[in-house]
Amino acid sequence: MSTSEPAADSILSLRGVTKRFGGLLAVDEVSFEVPKGQVFSLIGPNGAGKTTLFNCITGMYTPTAGDVILEGRNISGAKPHRTAQLGIARTFQNIRLFEYMTALDNVKVGCHVRMHAKLWDALFKTPFARREEAAVAEQAREQLRFVGIEQHADNYARNLAYGQQRRLEIARALATQPRLLLLDEPAAGFTPQEKVELMALVQKIIDRGITVFLIEHDMRVVMEVSQRIAVLDHGEKIAEGPPAEVRANRRVIEAYLGKSA
Amino acid sequence: MRGIRAYVREHARDPNFIAYAAMGIGALIFPAVVQFATGGNGDALVSLAADGGVYVLLAIGLNVVVGFAGLLDLGYAAFFAIGAYTYGMLASEQLISSPLHHAVHIPFWIALFIGLFVAAGAGALLGAPTLRLRGDYLAIVTLGFGEIVPRFFRNMRDWTSGVNGISALDPPSLPGWITGPWVNTSFGWVPNFKFLSFNATAWYVLIVILVTASVFGVNNLYRSRLGRAWMAVREDETAAAAMGVNTVSTKLLAFAIGASFSGFAGAFYGAKLSLVSPDNFTFIISITILSMVVLGGMGNVAGAMVGGLLLYWVLYYFLPNAPQQASGLATSIGMDWLNHAVPNGWPGIAEFINRLKFILFGLILVSIMLLRPQGLLPSRLRAQELHRGVHDEPVKTVA
């Protein structure tokens, strides 16, 4: 499957994306293409600018320069809720659930962007609003079932175990019906067993036709699930290619282990 | 019938259901009970209760902003003022002295909704510059707004009569009204009925209807897409945005809808009092309403209503009557000497209590908050929040 050429059919392309915070250059003219229907991973040492890049893609930050193109549409500088509407969903490195809402309600918030009830419908509970609410409740349960935490639907998000919280975040992101799912270190803090389960879940997500864009530190996970990997160091892309190629790349090894004298 | 019975059985242990049922039944029988207990002289009490309904309405509205969306608003009385002044200008002779030179007399039933929309517009207007602010900073801006609005009305002398306020507002009228034993007459039909100050029961019925309608509306909103978006913004604005919630419009709607209830309340209040003056909408009103919401249970509609009723009762019935009650009590237990003032010494029990009024008020507030920090009738959520540690803390810092 994987080739060293960028796939012709890409869902997301970055063209010279740069993000500068005052004097700090967090992301420096990064370009790459995320092929449709695969797992694309972004790796790099701590502080390399990976999450900043995610924030630029999802509209949390506006890139200082460069373009973010989602399926041919330039979305650089679009607001986060707009990028969600256009089909990008994400999870967060440090879990950001709605802690004092039930797991089910968390996922229902994810459904928000695909709902159409207007203020009027909500205020008077019109038949349309009732039908939509019922459908959303069913969809939300379906997502919880998909990630395997359906039995916790009525628990507060904050009362779930750590691994379940990570799963809930994924369920919530999936509820926005994305075409591109950005996972920010989903395996952080996982046991080896949980990592195996996570990889299976990522595969299930791919099978649904959703492209997965992954930031991850755990090399076993990255090498196993991804078809293509880009490496970031000090905000700069230093390598890109299929796992085997990246693993052998001299600059990548240097970035992680330091230059040999 | 069976449906109702099953519903009651299912909810019999739900504190919210009990509160709603108690308030509903209480509201229905209150005028009759009062008239019976006072031998037909209960109009003053019924009228007082109708004013209490205004505060309940205000508490419901502020709960949307503070409780649902988590936006601390210290200037809520501003919207109350806007509702009242809207009705004042649209239903009195006031505008003759304005550059319009024409009095406007819009029927109350229409003006009520104009007041609602004007207040909602003002809510959105205040919301717009505060969108980037959170927590304390937002509170300060709303505080400023709450101070500006009454001052604005005071200074627009041509339109509002300045410090004197607008008086002689049109009373609402209906084609007819039923009277009966509850106002100490026999059953009868009054054609061309006008809501005047001595028709306490009519005002009471009107505010009960307004509150009931608001409760249904606001509960529907709470359980809707919008209600969830409000909670999501309150919990984590960034995550909400990433999930596709437009935080700008969500927050603006919270401000606008919250304000619209006080637009309702303001129009009713102005019409009932037949007077709107800038002194009726001071900072203390904003704080009182906020206390009602916090005390009752933030984020819970029934809680805000209970808090509103309780604080209103304390402030406008219990405390004003306390000196007299204390004096009566002293006499009846044979300690009449407590009532005799000593020059430069003991002021008499009534005056003593009168001087202590606000200390008592403070004590009541503090003790309720100490005994029930989550409010009298908390939302399920808030109850959890205040019992941190009882439940397992998720291990979030591992990453």
Image (tube, rainbow, N blue to C red):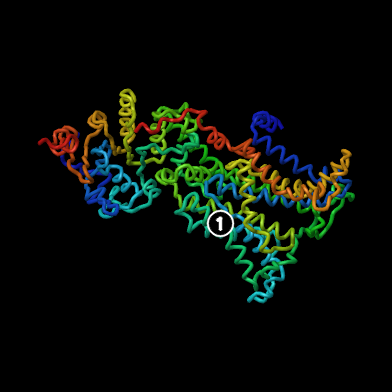
Number of numbered markers: 1
Task: Say which quarter of the image contains residue A200.
Answer: top left
Q: Chain of mark 1?
A: B
**Nearer to us in this view, A152 or B397:** B397
Q: Pick whichever, A209 or B10, lies toward us.
A: B10
Locate residue B45 relative to residue B161 in the image: left or right. Answer: right
Determine the residue located farthest toward the top in the rendered image: A193
Q: Quadrant of the C terminus of chain B?
A: top left
Q: Position of residue A49 (x, y in %)?
A: 27, 44
* Residue located farthest toward the front when viewing the structure as drawn: B344
Q: Is residue B302 visible?
A: no
| Quarter of the picture holding the N terminus of chain B | top right
Q: What is the crowding at mark 1: few (fewer than 14 residues within 10 Å), some, or many (at least 20)?
A: many
Q: Residue B164 or B171: which is nearer the viewer?
A: B164
Answer whether residue B326 is visible to the viewer in this image.
Answer: yes
Residue located 40% across and 41% down the image: A176
Residue type at mark 1? Leu
Describe the element under mark 1 as helix, strand or loop: helix
Q: Name the residue beneath numbered marker 1.
A: B143
Residue situated in front as seen by the camera: B8 or B141 = B141
Does B295 sit left or right of B247 as displayed? right
Q: Residue at x 60, y 46 (%)?
A: B218
Against A42, is B257 above or below? below
| Residue A118 pos. (x, y %) | 52, 49
Q: Is residue B53 left or right of residue B69?
A: right
* Residue B289 in picture, x, y percent from top left: 63, 50
Which residue is painted at 70% across and 49% down in the image?
B358
Using residue A5 as the reference point, say whether residue B190 is left or right of it: right
- The image position of residue B150, as x and y in percent, is 62, 63
